[in-house]
Image (spheres, rainbow, N blue to C red):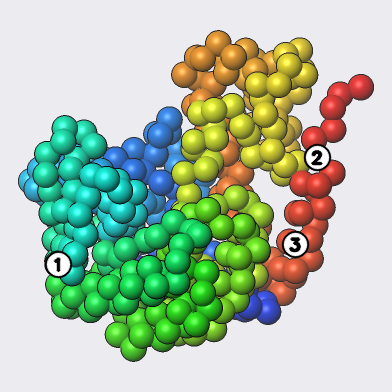
Amino acid sequence: MTDRFQFSLLATDGKARRGQISMPRGVVRTPAFMPVGTVGTVKAMYLTQVRELGADIILGNTYHLMLRPGAERVARLGGLHELIRWPEPILTDSGGFQVMSLSGLRKLDEKGVTFKSHVDGALHHMSPERSIEIQGLLDSDIQMQLDECLALPAERNEIERAMELSLRWAERCKVAFGDQPGKAMFGIVQGGDIPELRVRSAEALAGLDLKGYAVGGLAVGEPQAVMLDMLDTTCPALPADKPRYLMGVGTPDDILKSVARGIDMFDCVMPTRSGRHGLAFTRHGRINIRNARHAEDPRPLDEASSCPAARDYSRAYLHHLVRSNEALGGMLLTWNNLSYYQDLMAGIRAAIEEGRFQSFMEETQETWARGDIAPR
């Protein structure tokens, strides 16, 4: 434990990095996957389960929490950690991605963004300063700058305008955040799919000497190859002694390939959302438990898994639950999926420490490619 925010690089294997973020509320082992707790809940999971699976940190969403139950109310109740009974670190996003997705319900200018709540239509204004204030009221450990995120494809002039605006907002967020030794504010690299703009954004943010840096505006409609090209461009322009966070990513394959390019932190709703819709992630690849071939299959999802959801329930039962729209089906598949993601991250960390990350990645991808063998 420490009273300051510190990042230590413990090992490297090629561009892959094994590190550790130390904060007053705990240690985050990197590369790390952060389960998404949008409104103070990782959907279909008890937070004690999430911790037992190996998660060191979860993500909360500023936009949703400011609308319900409200940042000031959360603060009066002791902060987000106390409210949701999660004593470990929490990262909050700025709310920018959700606000930008409102399109017709928002108006953006230099000061910030004015938007209508999707809940009740009430009018709100989010400035860089207000975003940081809300995240402070939530008492999160890592706070993100407000930025403008564009879906791809987009015109170059629009991408450059949003990138420059995000840089100016980063400076304002840094001032608003001030000096909080035990916490961190991360800047967000923008620039769409244009390498020159990505480098310009990364270098300008590095000049602000922030405690960490995120790569935003990816996994927003572009092919995986474009995302990886942007990481190849961006990561070398970021400080090597600070954590790097790829926002909103992604699939297990996305994670492997991004770690290979120097990314340390990830978040995505995919494992929880997929679980609620009948899709399981396993070491054999994806399994759509809705498929009829599972209706009489007595095997578990993975007999070698340490997760009871993967090991102790038959595919036939999971198929029945999902096809019957029983809540337990989504709960068990979500449990399985988050377990698999954390097992994958643990395997990645061990492989980097032992200097065998490339072989680990290839073996993992080969196992996925072989697929799930049907019973005879």
**To which residue does mark 1 refer?**
111
- Location of the N terminus by quadrant is bottom left
Residue 221 visible somewhere in the drawing: yes
Would you place residue 279 above or below residue 353 in this image?
above
- As rendered, which of 92 and 162 lies closer to the eye? 162
- The image position of residue 305, as x and y in percent, is 67, 38
**To which residue does mark 3 refer?**
360
Q: Would residue 342 appear left or right of 197 to someone viewing this image?
A: right
Would you place residue 302 above or below residue 255 in this image?
above
The tag on residue 371 is: 2
Mark 2, secondary structure of its residue: loop
First in sequence: mark 1 vs mark 2: 1
Task: Tell me the mark number nearer the camera, choosing from 1 and 2.
Answer: 1
Residue extending farthest bottom? 207
Q: What's the residue type where badge 3 is placed?
A: Phe
Mark 1, secondary structure of its residue: loop
Would you place residue 367 above or below residue 255 in this image?
above
Q: Spatial distance from mark 1 to mark 3, Cα to Cα?
A: 47 Å
- The image position of residue 318, as x and y in percent, is 62, 19
Q: Would residue 180 appear left or right of 42 to someone viewing this image?
A: left
Residue 266 visible somewhere in the drawing: no
Task: Tell me the mark number nearer the camera, choosing from 2 and 3.
Answer: 2
Q: What's the residue type where badge 1 is placed?
A: Lys
